[in-house]
Each structure stands twice: as C-alpha cells, then as structure tokens.
Image (cartoon, grey):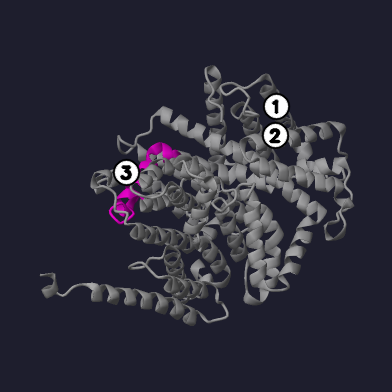
C-alpha cells in the first residue's frame, strides 16, 4: 500500500471512513434495495484501491499516477450506472431482455477494472483465476471430454459476470453478504482495536501463558486466538501480534522459522474463533441458509481443539529445547488485565444477540455502539473523536480489498455454474473417489489446499464448496451427513491453506518479521497447525464435537480428539514427560492417527487406544524418571 502524502492522504482517509460509516448506518437502520447496496459497496471501495495500491514496483510510492486516476474513474463508472438505473437492472429479465451496447461497454469496463484491482490489492493468483474462468466460458466448447462446455457469446459472458445479480457475478449474493453483514462485523473489529481491546487480549495472553515453559510461544497462541475475535484475517493477526511475539520467541531460544511457524499457525486459527469467524463463515450462513449462531455453536469445540493442539505442540517443543517462561517483569499484573475487563461487555452483547437470532448485521451494529459506550467508562479506554474516525477509516481500508476479492469470486462461481463446470469437477472428484467417502474427503481437502495457493480463504472456500460439498452430501447420505458438516469441513481446510506450503500468506508475513525462509516457516506452521487436519475430518465422522447428541456423545468425541492430538503432537516433537525414542514416537503417532481416523472402530475403542497409549507412555516415563533418581543416602 502507498504511503500517501499531503491533502490526498487525508482525502483517502476520510473517503475510507465515510464509506465504512455508511455501511454501519445501514447495518443498524436497514439497507436499500439489494442491487443498490451492492452497487454502492463497490462504487465506494473499488476506485479507492487504485489510489492506494501501486500498479508495479516502479510506480510512484507516495502519490497515484495519472493512469491510476484514470483506472479509478473507469472503475467507478459501471457501479454508478447500476445505482442510477437500479430499478431497470432489478426488473430486467436475465438473458431475455436486450443487453445493449452501453451495457456491454460498462460490463467490460467493470470486469477489467475489477481484475486489475484484485491483482494490485489482493492476490494476482485470484485475478488469473477470474480471467481463466472467463476464458473458459469463451472457448470451453473446444475442450474435449467431460470439461466440454456449450458455446457462449461475448454478450452472454459479460452479462453473466456483471449483470445477473440473482445467480452470481459481480452483484451476486456473495457481494450482498459482504456489503451487509460482513462489513458491519469488520467495523466491530476495528472499534475493538481502537478501544484498546487488543491491549486487553495481549495482556491476558501474557498473564495466562507467560509464566509457563515456552511462555512467549504460548502467549502468541493465546493472543492470536483472542485477536481472531476482532479480525478474520490471518495476515493481519500475524502483523499485529507477531511484531511482539516473534522477536521475543527468537530472543528466548526459538529458531526464527519455528517462531514464525508458531505465530502463523496461531494466527490462521483466528478465523476459526467464535463469535467472529471471518468472512467465510458469514458466506457459509448465506449459502446454507443456516443461522450464523448455529454455525458459531457448531464450530466452538473445533476451534478450542485447534488451539489446544497448538499449545500442546508448543509445550512439547519448549520442554524439548529447554525454553523457559517469560521474565516476570514482562508479564503484566492481573490488575493491569482487569483494568480493561469491561471491554468484554460488547462481545457479550454480540454473542447474546446472535444467540437470540437477531440478524448478524444488527447484532454487530449494536455491539459496535456498545463498544464505544463501554470504552467511555474509563479514561484509559475512552475513545476520542480521532480514535473513532480512525476506527472507521481502518475498517474501510480492510473492506476495500475484500469487496473486490468477493466480487471476483462471484464471477468464478457464475462461470462454474453457467458452464456446468461445478458438475464436471464434482463428477471428476467423485469418479476418482470411486464411491469412497473417505477418499472423496481427502481429494476435496487437497483441492481446497491447492486453491489456497493463490487465492484468499473466502474465495477458496466458496469455489471448493460449490465443487465438492454436493458430492460429500451425496456419498455421506447413508451416514446422515448434513450441509453444515460438509461446509465446516471445507471451511477448515480453506483456513489452513493460509499456512501450508508452498505459498502461505500468513507464513510469508511471519517469515518477514522473523527474517526466516518463507518456505521453511510455512512447513513449521503446518506442523504446529496439524490439528486442523484432524478436526476437519472430525466434523464429518465425530459430530459430537459440534455439540450434537447426548452429553456422553459430546464428551467422548471431544476426549478422542484430545487424546489423538496430544499423541500426534507429542510424537512429532519427540517429547512427552521426557524425550521419546524413535520406537515410542512411531507407536504414539500410529495410535494418535488410529484414534483420529480409524472410524471403522467404535468410539469407545478409539478412545481406549488413544488414552491407553498416552497413559502407558506417560507412566513408563514417570517410572523411568523415578528409577533414575538417587536414593537419599546416595546423594550424600
């Protein structure tokens, strides 16, 4: 992003703040017609990106060029036209009413400027994917076999991508959910940061975990999980918390790549943390028509398991390396933590309203207002007018790249649907699985991880869900698998893709702070985030972790995962109560994998395998330690 100077800096700051404030107002007092809201959303955010993000590394760093101003003006024209003619757009019959030359020009302008905005401000890989989907619509009829598509005229391609708001494209339902619910939640997160809630989370993480072995790493895990309630972005979590925790970890003995990997894995998990699970979770609610509150409840134990596994891995690593706790002078006193404790109240308001089935946008609106009001209770958290305006501006700067990313994903989904590629890809995966649900899940997980190489979490989840979820539901029908299970499975792997090699946005950001190899950092991030792989499959095979079934079912499913994750992380680290030899590591790893994935066995047997192996190895090490202790007489 450019470091603008002079009056333009303040103009863009005010622009972002005003755009965010409009979204907050609509969140509390009602939205205009869908096509109007979606047009306004893209109108206020897309041009801003051309002023803030340079086209190339050689572009001016402190001011936009003349060409940037031209891009900004061109990107505004299609959305302004849609807002001005919203009734005609809403009333037109798609693919029946004429698609005029004016519409054609505006549609092409919209697509081209959107691609350029995505390339600059989001990921070039996503821009290439959007462009590839358009190319496929144009020439897919030349592709032989199952990927063959019917011919599309240029007008049909532009119309499907731009002006079919009911099915997908730029103004489709995905843009709608971002312009309404997700935008207001981003505002809530920005006001949490502006009020000092970040300080509360940082101090709480240090107070809770800093006194234990490997303290800085555990602080990174706890703090990143808490920051996840404010931000669904793994990269922003890394930048916010990693700037403090990574240097501290390195100073106390962690290798730079390991420190970056720990922070990456922890920050990625922020998107899994209720009550704000990131943009993809809201999209999931829109796609499935499942209330967001139900998604939060179903995902809660899974998020806890993810962070438990990272903490376990960090603990074993610290014990193995002999890394001590944080210095007492660096650990905040509990009175310092409690001084900001009142800032938890707006989060409680948000959770209560969501559980009472209020709309997500209204719940986030009320929580944002409550955050400002509650912050006023103490001088140390009181927000000045500048703080409030900064929070609006920061929210707007966060919304802008997400707006174009989701609009681009809408084009991809529209192309997949119109060409029948969803059915074709789904058929390919299903054919490769050969009717085996487990193999289908592995293939879908790999698909999501591959998509995550070049595109952010939310578009990755959207595309993979369109391709694979129907197949999971079809093969999983005998097991009673429902849409929420299939979508949570896909969602978890979309989140984890931000930390897995060879391209991992969160790990690369952490590597830059740690001054380590991005690839090695992403390998360590995958190691510490291994829980995401087991928890993802548990949503399918162990629905007890979604708080389903009896209390015994829930407790058994959770205990199985706890035992499996402890065994797997301990085997990887080579430490439990003491260093573990290679044979025991292999045994523990095999037992952990069996407990997690041997679904041909009943739950009781899997739990016994995990608990018995864990208890047996711990007992052996405890007895060996006692036997090694000298007798009192020998000490003398």
Residue 84 percent location from the top left of the image: 73, 31
Residue 209 magenta-highlighted: yes
Visible residue check, residue 126: yes
Say which label, 1 or 3, has the lower sequence index. Answer: 1
Q: Nearer the viewer, mark 3 or mark 2?
A: 2
Q: Name the disc covering residue 71, or none.
A: 1
> Dots 1 and 2: beta carbons under 8 Å?
yes
- Disc 1 + disc 3, Cβ < 8 Å: no
**Badge 2 is on which residue?**
116
- Crowding at dot 3, Cα within 10 Å, few <14 / some 14-19 / many 20+, comes out as many
Can the viewer see residue 559?
Answer: no
627 or 620: nearer the viewer: 627
**What are the residue bounds of the magenta stretch?**
191-216
Where does residue 505 sit, x and y in percent of width and height? 56, 45
> How packed is label 2: few (under 14 Cα within 10 Å), some, or many (20 or more)?
some
Q: Which mark is residue 291?
A: none
Taking the spot 52% from the left edge, 65% from the top edge, the residue there is 535
Residue at the disc numbered 3: 340
Number of marks in the rendered image = 3
* Magenta residues, dominant SS class: helix
Q: Nearer the viewer, mark 1 or mark 3?
A: 1
Quadrant containing the N terminus in the rendered view: top right
Q: Report, in whole angstroms, how far the alpha carbon at label 1 lies from the one at label 3.
A: 45 Å
Q: Identify whether 7 is placed above or below 54.
A: above
Which residue appears at 57% of the width and 38% of the height? 399
Q: Is residue 635 magenta?
A: no
Whether the residues at callouts 3 and 2 have beta carbons within 8 Å, the answer is no
Q: Residue at x 71, y 23 (%)?
A: 70
Dot 2: what SS? helix
């Amino acid at each position: 992003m450019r470091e603008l100077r002079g009056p333009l800096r303040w103009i863009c700051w005010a622009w972002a703040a005003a755009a965010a404030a409009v979204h907050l107002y609509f969140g509390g007092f009602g939205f205009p017609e869908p096509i109007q809201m979606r047009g306004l959303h893209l109108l206020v955010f897309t041009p801003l990106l051309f002023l803030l993000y340079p086209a190339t590394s050689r572009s001016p760093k402190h001011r936009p060029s003349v060409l940037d101003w031209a891009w900004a003006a061109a990107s505004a024209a299609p959305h302004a036209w849609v807002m001005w003619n919203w009734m005609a757009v809403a009333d037109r019959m798609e693919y029946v009413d004429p698609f005029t030359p004016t519409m054609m020009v505006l549609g092409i302008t919209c697509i081209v400027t959107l691609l350029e905005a995505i390339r600059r401000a989001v990921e070039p890989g996503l821009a290439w994917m959007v462009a590839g989907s358009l190319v496929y619509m144009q020439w897919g009829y030349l592709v032989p076999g199952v990927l063959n598509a019917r011919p599309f005229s240029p007008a049909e391609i532009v119309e499907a991508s731009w002006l079919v708001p009911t099915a997908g494209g730029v103004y489709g339902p995905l843009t709608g959910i971002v312009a309404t619910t997700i935008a207001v939640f981003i505002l809530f997160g920005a006001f949490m940061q502006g009020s000092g809630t970040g300080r509360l989370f940082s101090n709480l993480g240090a107070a809770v975990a800093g006194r234990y072995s490997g303290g800085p790493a555990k602080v990174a895990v706890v703090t990143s999980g808490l920051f996840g309630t404010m931000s669904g972005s793994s990269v922003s979590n890394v930048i916010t918390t990693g700037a403090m925790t990574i240097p501290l970890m390195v100073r106390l003995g962690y290798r730079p790549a390991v420190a970056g990997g720990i922070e990456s894995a922890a920050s990625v998990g922020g998107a899994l943390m209720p009550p704000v699970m990131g943009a993809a979770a809201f999209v999931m609610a829109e796609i499935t028509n499942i209330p967001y509150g139900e998604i939060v409840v179903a995902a809660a134990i899974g998020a806890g398991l993810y962070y438990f596994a990272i903490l376990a891995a960090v603990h074993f690593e610290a014990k193995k390396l002999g890394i001590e706790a944080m210095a007492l002078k660096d650990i905040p006193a509990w009175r310092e933590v409690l001084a900001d404790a009142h800032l938890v109240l707006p989060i409680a308001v948000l959770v209560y309203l969501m559980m009472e089935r209020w709309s997500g946008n209204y719940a986030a609106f009320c929580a944002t207002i409550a955050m400002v009001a509650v912050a006023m209770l103490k001088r140390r958290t009181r927000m000045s007018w500048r703080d409030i305006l900064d929070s609006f501006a920061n929210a707007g700067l966060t919304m802008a790249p997400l707006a174009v990313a989701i609009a681009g994903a809408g084009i991809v989904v529209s192309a997949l649907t119109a060409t029948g590629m969803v059915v074709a890809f789904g058929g390919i995966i299903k054919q490769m699985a050969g009717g085996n649900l487990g193999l289908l899940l592995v293939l879908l997980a790999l698909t999501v991880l591959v998509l995550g190489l070049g595109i952010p979490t939310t578009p990755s989840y959207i595309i993979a869900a369109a391709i694979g979820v129907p197949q999971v539901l079809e093969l999983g029908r005998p097991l009673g698998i429902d849409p929420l299970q299939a979508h949570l499975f896909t969602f978890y792997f979309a989140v984890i893709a931000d930390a897995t090699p060879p391209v991992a946005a969160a790990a690369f950001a952490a590597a830059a702070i740690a001054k380590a190899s991005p690839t090695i950092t992403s390998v360590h991030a995958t190691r510490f985030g291994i829980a995401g792989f087991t928890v993802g499959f548990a949503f399918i095979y162990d629905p007890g972790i979604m708080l389903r079934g009896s209390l015994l079912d829930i407790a058994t499913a959770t205990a199985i995962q706890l035992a499996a994750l402890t065994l797997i992380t301990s085997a990887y680290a080579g430490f439990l109560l003491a260093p573990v030899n290679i044979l025991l590591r292999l045994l523990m790893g095999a037992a952990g994998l069996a407990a997690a994935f041997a679904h041909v066995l009943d739950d009781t047997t899997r739990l016994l395998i995990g608990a018995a192996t864990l208890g047996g190895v711990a007992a052996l090490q405890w007895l060996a330690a006692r036997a090694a202790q000298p007798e009192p007489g020998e000490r003398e």
